[in-house]
Amino acid sequence: QVHLVQSGGGLVQAGGSLRLSCAASARTFSSYAMAWFRLAPGKEREFVAAMDSSGADIYYADSVKGRFTISRDNAKYTVYLQMNSLSPKDTAVYYCAAPPTRYLTGSYAQIDQYTYWGQGTQVAASS
């Protein structure tokens, strides 16, 4: 069982920055890919970013590419999402996610690849 505890988020003006953190309980954290998804009102949960266990492979949704950066500190069992140039379109509840095994059976962007989820963190950017 893996517990993911998120922190960060909040309300900023458009163009501002926020950083989200997601701390994992498992010492095996360093062996697993990690991802961020978001859920906006009236929409389905969508992929934001993902990173493999080593940090060598990184994936972003087109909507955040160039503005968001995913990173991880395996010594601290923590994954981060640095969000710059935020716009009202980025307003959503953000979730970190971890798969049940070391190896994914599909795309990093597929929501069904992930079993463990953080509690969610509200991010809002005002115009």
Image (cartoon, rainbow, N blue to C red):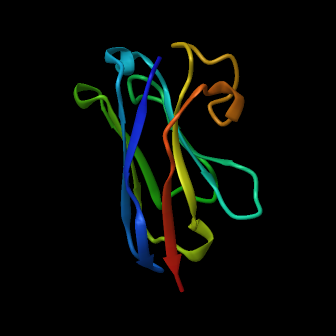
Q: Residue at x 31, y 16 (%)?
A: 27
Residue 121 shown left or right of residue 79 in the figure? right
Q: How many marks?
A: 0
Indicate whether 7 appears above or below 105. below
* Residue at the farthest bottom position: 127
Please give the name of the residue rendered at 48% of the width and 71% of the height, measured from the top-left corner.
86
Q: Is residue 85 visible to the viewer in this orientation of the structure?
A: yes
Q: Residue at x 37, y 21 (%)?
A: 29
Quadrant of res 26: top left
In depth, the one of 58 and 96 nearer the eye is 96
User: Where residue 101 sits: x, y (%)?
Assistant: 55, 13
Q: Is residue 58 visible?
A: no
Q: Is residue 83 above or below residue 2?
A: below
Q: Residue at x 49, y 25 (%)?
A: 33
Place of residue 97 in the rendered image (x, y in percent of width and height, measured from the top left): 53, 34
In the figure, residue 43 lies in which quadrant? bottom right
Q: Position of residue 63 (x, y in %)?
A: 63, 59
Question: In this orientation, which residue lies closer to the viewer: 49 or 18?
Answer: 18
Q: Which quadrant of the rendered structure holds the C terminus?
A: bottom right
Residue 93 vs 104, above or below: the answer is: below
Residue 32 % position (x, y): 45, 20
